[in-house]
Image (cartoon, helix red, strand yellow):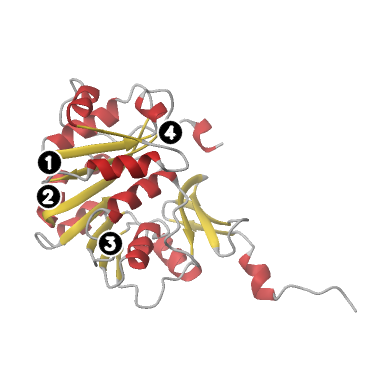
Amino acid sequence: MGKSRKPRRAQAALAAVEETVDGGLAQLIPDRDRARAWTLLIDGAPQSHVDLDDPAYLSFEYQRRLGHVIDLAAPPGKPLQAVHLGGGALTLARYVAATRPRSTQQVVERDASLVELVRRELPLAPGARIRVRSADAREGLAKVPDGWADLIVADVFSGARTPAHLTSTEFLDEIRRALRPGGLYGANLADGPPLAHLRGQIATAAARFPELALIADPAVLRGKRFGNAVLVAGDQPLPIAELTRRAASDPHPGRVEHGTRLADFTGGATPVTDAAAVASPAPPPSVFR
């Protein structure tokens, strides 16, 4: 007998997928350790990881921290009305659908060709109730009804940088308008030493939200390396103790700053307005090596 061969479909599932999208070269790289899991890269920068068999699994450090925010946005299992600014591989929308069935979600992703690629290669589960709109994040946010969202997640990068118009007080005015009272806002921020961008974003959020927390690797907070930080904001007291416990128990433990310590970290940074806004700093090439 000849050697047994894997079915052709199994072989195809192991092959990387490459396609040019609006934002550059998109690559879907199979995860060697998980049968139907993929990492999405744009121009070599990792954007998302998704496991089609287990969408509640979050591989990326910052996505796990945003997952903690999602978990604490309402009692376990309660459906949410959620808005995701930035789609990637739709990882966090899939997470909400898996952990909170019957949730209603809107995803705003500017890159229409990326959305098409992800839908084709990494199809959403039937009945996921996820609507994807191809639009600029701020333009798409403007179409969300007042007070509609229990949760808004911002994870928008263009060329590995957050666009300037998504860093201002005017942008956060739209976030507050679309959030219901008691709703949560979570944002993925990226910065490195001297952390001027991160401090400015905290000051900007403090100008619009009475309650703030920041989750990050201690080395990032000390300005030792470039990395991600998750900003959490709301109009009611945040679940600081539980956020702290969950962040500390992550495979790469994170620290939660809030209150006086967060204000001290922010230092003399001032809120950013549309007129003065700039994109977040580009990560050094070493980040993706």
- Residue 273 visible? The answer is no
Which one is in front in this view, the residue at disc 4 or the one at disc 1?
1
Report, in whole angstroms, how far the alpha carbon at label 4 lies from the one at label 1. 28 Å
Give me the residue at 43% from left, 69% from top. Answer: 119
Q: Nearer the viewer, mark 4 or mark 2?
A: 2
- Badge 2 is on which residue? 176
Instruction: Report the side of 16 relative to 92 (left or right).
Output: right
Mark linked to residue 283 = 4
Q: Label 4 crowding class (10 Å Cα cut-off): few <14, some 14-19, many 20+? A: some
- Please provide percent x and percent y for residue 210: 10, 39
- Secondary structure at badge 1 equals loop
Along the polypeptide, which appears first: circle 4 or circle 1?
A: 1
Nearer to me, 177 or 115: 177
Q: Earlier in the sequence, mark 4 or mark 2?
A: 2
Tell me if label 2 and label 1 are in contact, CB under 8 Å: yes
Q: Quadrant of the C terminus?
A: top right
Determine which quarter of the picture holds residue 110.
bottom left
